[in-house]
Image (cartoon, rainbow, N blue to C red):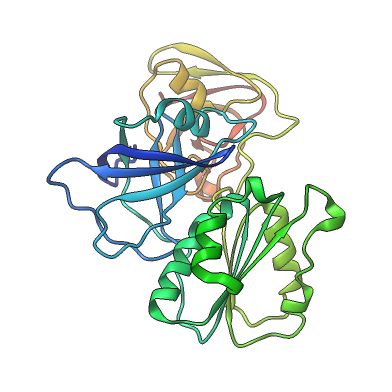
Amino acid sequence: MSEKIEAIKMTVKDRRSLTPSIMEFVLTPQEGTDLPGYGPGAHVTVQTPSGAMRRYSLTGAGDNPKQFVIAVKREPASRGGSQSMFDDATEGTALLVEPPENDFPLKKASKYLLIAGGIGITPIFAMARHLDSAGDDFNIIYCTRNAEETAYLTDLTEAYGDRVLLHHDDGDPEKLYDFWDHFAEPQNMHVYCCGPKPLMEEIKAISGHWPEGRVNFEDFKPVDVIRPDDVAFDVELARSGKTITVQSDRSILEAVRDAGVPTVSSCESGTCGTCKTGLISGDVDHRDMVLMDEQRQDHIMICVSRARSGGLVIDL
């Protein structure tokens, strides 16, 4: 876990299936531990049973919380995080959870449009709950493949009625929702969008003429940790003398963890800086969003970066 933030020891109190691929988890702290409050749009970083660190949005109310509620999607190409939550985070499982952070906070506005795609409904649901309790004006557009794969379908429709517009595209690009009418003319409202990359790219493209700050996005994957053309390479750990092969579908951090070598991490997406490691030699493909140019000569973010050619030697 991160050395900068003290993790909270929590237990899986309950879990329920929202869709065939999305599971909700209710996490409670150890007795005597008070949970920090948080605002809608906040997330927590969870050390999953596999050891992988993953960020999940909080769906419950953040005023004096007694539990954290998250929803996890089992990714088809999971590298250990979501799959281990599904398979191993059963009731009673102990987990380490970092305190909430919020990179997607609600701003005061006269009206809100909340847009979600797939698992992106989690922060959007929290926002809807907050706005509804405050009596604010909002609408939701929620896009999914079909009703069976729509998390919180009943909860949303029963709570907010015709304020929720549901759209199912059946996986057909020709049936994607057309957002243009909502963005053709800038409106006196704030938009919050969370979902898969194509959805957010579309909203960014059609809202470019809106005033800055009116359209807001949440994205836990600012970089591609693994890319289709990635190849295996070797990493020498200078302190131990071990040489580890990093397969094409694994990060250096994951390979080091798999080999039983202690290390620290938090976001595992190249944005927080926790896993910064000394670089001794090698040609690095830097993929992080943290290091300054002058730092890249002798440091590497092992959660996302790889060898450009040959192998690497790092200070572990």
**Position of residue 91 measured from the top left corner of the image (x, y, whole percent):** 33, 32
Q: Quadrant of the C terminus?
A: top left
Q: Is residue 258 above or below residue 28?
A: above
Q: Outermost residue, left direction?
A: 32
**Position of residue 192 measured from the top left corner of the image (x, y, whole percent):** 57, 69
Q: Outermost residue, top direction?
A: 242
- Asked whether residue 280 appears in the rendered view, the answer is no
Q: Nearer the viewer, residue 102 or 298?
A: 102
What's the residue at 56%, 64% (across, down)? Answer: 157
Q: Is residue 294 above or below residue 203?
A: above
Q: Nearer the viewer, residue 103 or 243?
A: 103
**Position of residue 137 measured from the top left corner of the image (x, y, whole percent):** 52, 82
Q: Outermost residue, right direction?
A: 174
What's the residue at 46%, 67% (across, down)? Answer: 127
What's the residue at 42%, 25% (across, down)? Answer: 88
**Position of residue 231 measured from the top left corner of the image (x, y, whole percent):** 70, 23
Q: Quadrant of the N terminus?
A: top left
Q: Is residue 50 above or below residue 292?
A: above
| 107 displayed left or right of 186 | left
| 275 displayed left or right of 165 | left
What's the residue at 56%, 71% (across, down)? Answer: 161
